[in-house]
Amino acid sequence: MGVLDSVVTKAQATIPMRRQVQGMHLIQKTKHRVLGHHRPRFVEEPIPDVDEVSLTEIDVANPFMYRQGQFGPYARRLRDEAPVHYRAHSPFGPYWSLTRYDDIVAVDKDFERFSAEPQIVIGDPPDGLDIEMFIAMDPPRHDQHRAAVQDVVAPQNLEEMEALIRSRVAEVLDDLPLGEPFDWVDRVSIELTARMLATLLDFPYDERRKLVRWTELAAASASATGGTPGFDETYEGVAEMAQSFSELWHDKAARRAAGEKPGYDLITLMQMSEDTKDLIHRPMEFLGNLTLLVVGGNDTTRNSMSGGVVALNQFPEQFDRLRADHSLVPKLVHEIIRWQTPLAYMRRVATQDTVLNGQFIRKGDKVVMWYASANRDERKFEDPDEFVIERPNARNHLSFGIGTHRCMGSRLAELQLRILWEELLERFADIEVVEEPAYLQSNFVRGYTSLMVTLTPLG
Ligand code: HEM
C-alpha cells in the first residue's frame, strides 16, 4: 500500500462522510499531479563571494545563503546597487527582490497593488496542500478571518498566560545540566515553544512534540522554501495534523456540552465566536487557521530563543551590560528579534503593472520583501550588523512585517522571550556557546538545528 493510500484510509476512519468526498478529491488530484510533476531537490554547493558574481546572477533565494553566512553580503550589495532586483531564473521561478527598508514598508502596506494571495512563500506548497490561511488572503476576506481568532492573543489573555508561561520556563530551566555541554535548541527552544503551543491549543501535553514536527513539515517543503522534507513526508504530517485537530475540536465541543467551563484556548475561542463556531465544516479553512497559529508561533519564537544566545556570545560586552542591568530585558527582546529576523521574507504578487523605485514590475510578478535585509539596512539602522541592546530604534524592525498582515502573535512572542531572559538571568552567570551552531536549510526560516552550550550557575 502506498503512502497516499494509507493516508486515505486513515482519513476515512476519522473524517465525517461529507468531508471525505472533498478529501478524496483533493488526494486524487494530488496523486495525479505527483506522478508527472517535477519537484525541486537542493544539493548544497559553496556559494561564491558576492564580488565574484554579476548582478543578474544573484539569487538570494538560494536555500543555503543563510547557512553559509552569505545572505548578509549579498543583501548589502543589492541594497547598494539594485534595491529592486530581478532574478529571471530560479528553482522557484522568476522573482523580484526588495532589500531596502523603505521600499519594503511601502509594499507591505499596499495590499491593493501587492497581493498576499495565493502564497506568502516564494515557491509553491506541495500540490493538494494549499490550505487556506489568512496570512495569504487580501482584505476584506483577510480581515474577517483575522478578527475571528485574534482574541486568543488579546492583552487580557496574555496577562492570564503570563504566570503559566513563567512556571513552564522555570521547569525547563531548572532541569538543565550545569557545567556540561547540551543542545540548547532541543532542550530549551523547542521544548519551550512546544509547551507554549500545547497550552495555546489545550493540546494533550505529553504529545506536544508532535505539534513541533507537524509545523516543521508544513513550513519547510523543498518546493515552497527549499527545505528538506519530501512530498510524502509533508503530506503524511499534514494529514495526521488534520485528523488530530478535528478530534480535538469534537472532544472540546463534547466536554462543553457536558457542562465543563470553557477555557482560554484557541479552539474554545473559535467555538464561542459567531464567525468561527461552524469552522469544522469548512475543513481547509479550519486547518488553515490552526496551522497558521501553530506555525506562526513555532519556528519563529524558537529561533529567537536560540538567536539571543548566539548574539550575546558574539557580542560579550553586551552580555556584560545585561548581567549588570536586568531592566534591559525588554530592549534586549526587540534587538534579538531585529538581529535574528526569524522569517527572512514575505512574498507578494503585483496585481497591476506598476513602477517601484524606478523599476517596471508587471502584473503577476512575484515580489519578495526581504525583511532580513531591511533589518540590516544602513539607511535605517546605524551599524546594523552590530548587536546593541540599547539601540534606540530597535523596535522599528520589520521582523513582524507591517501593515494589514503585521504579525498577530508579536506580543505573545515578546512576552515569551522576556520571561525566558528574566528567568535565565536569575539562574545563570553564563551561557557559553561551545561549538559552531548548525543552521537550517531554508530560504524562509532563519533557524538553528543545533546549538551546543554550557551553563555556569550564579556564584
Ligand atoms: C504574521 C513573524 C510569532 C501568528 C506574521 C508575519 C511575520 C511574522 C513576518 C507576516 C507579516 C506581514 O506580512 O506583514 C513572526 C515572528 C515571530 C512571530 C518573527 C516571533 C518572533 C508569532 C506567534 C504567533 C504568530 C507567537 C501565534 C500566536 C501570526 C499570524 C500571522 C502572523 C496569525 C498572520 C497575520 C495576518 O495575516 O493578519 N508573523 N511571528 N506569530 N503571525 Fe507571526
Image (spheres, helix red, strand yellow):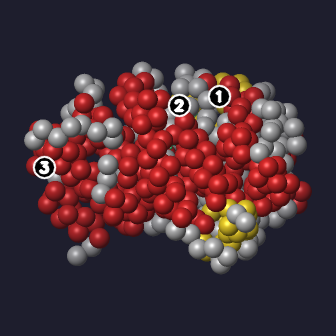
Which quarter of the image is occupied by the N terminus? bottom left
> For this view, does 239 lie left or right of residue 459?
left
The disc placed on residue 16 is 3
Crowding near pointer 3: few (<14 within 10 Å), some, many (20+)?
few
- Mark 1 or 2, nearer chain start: 1
Q: Position of residue 326 (x, y in %)?
A: 72, 45
Front residue of this view, candidates 326 and 450 = 326
Q: Is residue 134 visible?
A: no
Crowding near pointer 2: few (<14 within 10 Å), some, many (20+)?
many
Crowding near pointer 1: few (<14 within 10 Å), some, many (20+)?
many
Determine if the C-beta at disc 2 is less than 8 A from ligand 1.
yes
Q: Where is residue 435, by image quadrant? A: bottom right
The disc placed on residue 354 is none
Amino acid type indicated by mark 2 = His
Secondary structure under the numbered disc 3 in the rendered image: loop
Is residue 257 positioned above or below 459 on the image? above
- Mark 3 or 1, nearer chain start: 3
3D distance between C-alphas at marks 3 and 1: 42 Å
- Residue at the spot 52% in from the left edge and 57% down from the top edge: 170
Is residue 210 positioned above or below 97 on the image? below
Q: Position of residue 234 (x, y in %)?
A: 40, 62
Which quarter of the image is occupied by the C terminus? bottom right
- Residue at the spot 69% in from the left edge and 43% down from the top edge: 329
- Mark 2 or 3, nearer chain start: 3
Is residue 327 positioned above or below 219 on the image? above
Q: Where is residue 156, by image quadrant? A: top left
- Residue at the spot 82% in from the left edge and 54% down from the top edge: 320
Q: Which residue is mark 1?
A: 107
Determine if the C-beta at disc 1 is less than 8 A from ligand 1.
no
Secondary structure under the numbered disc 1 in the rendered image: helix
